Image: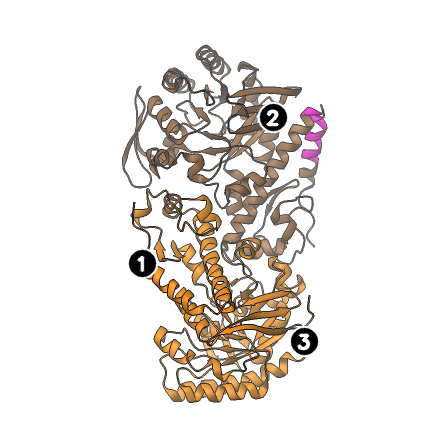
Chain colours: A orange, B brown
Amino acid sequence: MTQRFSFSLHATDGKARTGVISTPRGDIRTPAFMPVGTAATVKAMLPESVRATGADILLGNTYHLMLRPTAERVARLGGLHRFMNWDRPILTDSGGFQVMSLADLRKLTEDGVTFRSHVDGSRHHLSPERSMEIQRLLGSDIVMCFDECPALPADDRRVAESMRLSMRWAARSKAAFGDRPGHALFGIQQGGVTRELRDESAEKLREIGFDGYAVGGLAVGEGQAAMFGVLDYAPDMLPEDRPRYLMGVGKPDDIVGAVERGIDMMDCVLPSRSGRTGQAWTRRGQVNIKNARHMDDPRPLDEACTCPACRSYSRAYLHHVFRTGEIISSMLLTWHNLHYYQDLMEGLRKAIAAGGLDAFVRDFHALRAEGDIEPI
Amino acid sequence: MTQRFSFSLHATDGKARTGVISTPRGDIRTPAFMPVGTAATVKAMLPESVRATGADILLGNTYHLMLRPTAERVARLGGLHRFMNWDRPILTDSGGFQVMSLADLRKLTEDGVTFRSHVDGSRHHLSPERSMEIQRLLGSDIVMCFDECPALPADDRRVAESMRLSMRWAARSKAAFGDRPGHALFGIQQGGVTRELRDESAEKLREIGFDGYAVGGLAVGEGQAAMFGVLDYAPDMLPEDRPRYLMGVGKPDDIVGAVERGIDMMDCVLPSRSGRTGQAWTRRGQVNIKNARHMDDPRPLDEACTCPACRSYSRAYLHHVFRTGEIISSMLLTWHNLHYYQDLMEGLRKAIAAGGLDAFVRDFHALRAEGDIEPI
């Protein structure tokens, strides 16, 4: 196994790419979908089950972990991998986005953000330097720059100011990260939906130099059309020989559209969160398992799916355990959703490698357009 | 595999017994602890994980299943085994006990009980005949007679009347059960803590004739001393060549005391319910994982335990996921507790087979008396 972080592109199809990110903790096949393990657990899943779905890497949330159990405690206990029993790569976000969306009484300065915990009201400070320290204490394999991200829509001046602050923070993040062989630091492009600002941000990031580059500030309320509009040009602004990561995306059709536009990595809570609210994602779109139509249905969610929920349980059972509030409902539906997402990524990787992405995407949309199987 | 239900005793040590109950769906090693799968799931566990703890048989609750998803629906879907993905033996209770403890507006007559569902207020009727029908529709391997059980303490007249009604219902249960090769019907001894009534009940049950016999009406508030007082004589009143089942018991020391007194089967929600409230059972007694003393403890719950929670996670992690309300907390602690219970049963079986039960029980109590490991 490699002792360095590296990325090799194996094939392209149009703008879409497939390859492998190598890390000392294992390879990440791209395009990759990263399940979210917010507070040191992918909710309702054991880590060996997450791995069984085909995930090569998890995402952990700096904001949640710094509050509970705290980065220092995780470090004393041997790091996040050991703490949560996941020995493969972990990417951590910088905490910036969730401070803005979850914390109370935020105060933003050039130095960073002071805020109160949404859990117990305690005061905390995050800056590029503190975010790098926390992510180092956690033992993260892929570290994200500390950035600020305005909700969209926002006026150009606000977006530009925020982007420039994030770029100054990116330089400070790089300096604070230092030289850590086997660990990677990713820069985050900002600039909202404004091409010139995206260009300015990308230029600044390339100047600083990172191991990978994220397209940030999307999936924050702008809608799929606006997001794809940015993805039509933003990935091209980033170095071709480094992984490109689209943060916080998304629904299956968002993922397919992003991969078509040259994105290599994504993360989203959607498959796990949906699993806890009775929503299943299949090749035919979304299935709401609480609907009465499933009550007597002996068929699996998706007859072609090989996950435990589809292999061993009927829709009637999944409906029953959801309606009775049983924990196994969250366990099985989350497993199914993560399995479906990883199946989709595997399909995309194979299609790109074979030069058949267009046909794959056509079939993907055609089956979804047909919708769920007819009620019995 | 056998096509008949049978019980063979392999060894005894004092009054304690070890043997095997054979059924077409697999063997049950006795003394056996049956995890409770109330509403077609052992809460927070996949059935393959329940099996991995060493469980040979599950218990299902007629009352819960008749309300949701209903026995008729389970039958249409291929029976409870297929519905919940558990192909080994299932014992179902008769519904009687839970109607009395959970349902609203109960009306008891010679025929049976009319009540309203605690879920949606709908009206239902349970009688010996309907209970047998429901348990047949579910596909239960071991069916329990429909009985009535007063909460203790109760005066002798009330206990005697209730016991005699249960014995008339036992005869009706037997008639309604009919001849079902490979399936077993168990009678339930009643009579509270009064020896003469237990004797009268046992005589009546032997007269009717059953495949196994339960000691009912205990673990309903009388305390361990009173329960052991009854168990000092009640099992001896039941046929030696049939399994003896103590319903709804119990804590680890209840189980050990019951096995010492000649009990072959038990069930209890305690290990699974405790797992959801942060209570772990170990060889050293009870551990409350939410206590702050575990917050920085890198050690497992029990270093000698081979369950996934002990093999791969620290007390600090279990504390963290319990305090943050993560589902994995219920999953891991339930797994540990069920594993501990099955380990205890395996220890009891081996000790009885080797004629060393006294030493086993002495060690069991001695280690518990020492209490949990010292805080770090």
- Amino acid at pointer 1: Glu
The magenta stretch is B353-366
Q: Position of residue B354 (x, y in %)?
A: 71, 25
Q: Residues within 10 Å of mark 1 (few under 14, many from 20)?
A: few
Q: Which residue is mark 1?
A: A370
User: Which of A366/B321 is in front?
Assistant: A366
Mark 2 neighbour class, 10 Å CA radius: few under 14, some 14 to 19, many 20 or more: many
- Label of residue B228 in the image: none
Q: What numbered label is drawn on residue B259? A: 2
Asked whether the residues under marks 3 and 2 belong to the same chain, the reply is no
Three-letter amino acid code of the residue under disc 2: Val
Q: Position of residue B350 (x, y in %)?
A: 68, 29
- Quarter of the image holding residue B156? top left
Which chain is home to disc 2?
B
Give the residue at mark 3.
A180
Query: Regarding mark 3 in the picture, which secondary structure is present there?
Result: loop
Amino acid type, callout 3: Arg
Real-space CA distance between mark 3 and mark 2, rounded to the nearest whole angstrom: 59 Å
Give how far across and how far down residue A34 sits, in percent.
Answer: 52, 65
Q: CA distance from mark 3 to mark 1?
A: 50 Å
Q: Is the residue marked by circle 3 packed among few (<14), some (14-19), or many (20+) residues within 10 Å?
A: few
Mark 3, mark 1: which one is toward the viewer?
A: 1
Please tell me whether residue A42 is drawn above or below residue B182 in the rendered image: below
Question: Quick one: quadrant of the C terminus of chain A?
Answer: top left
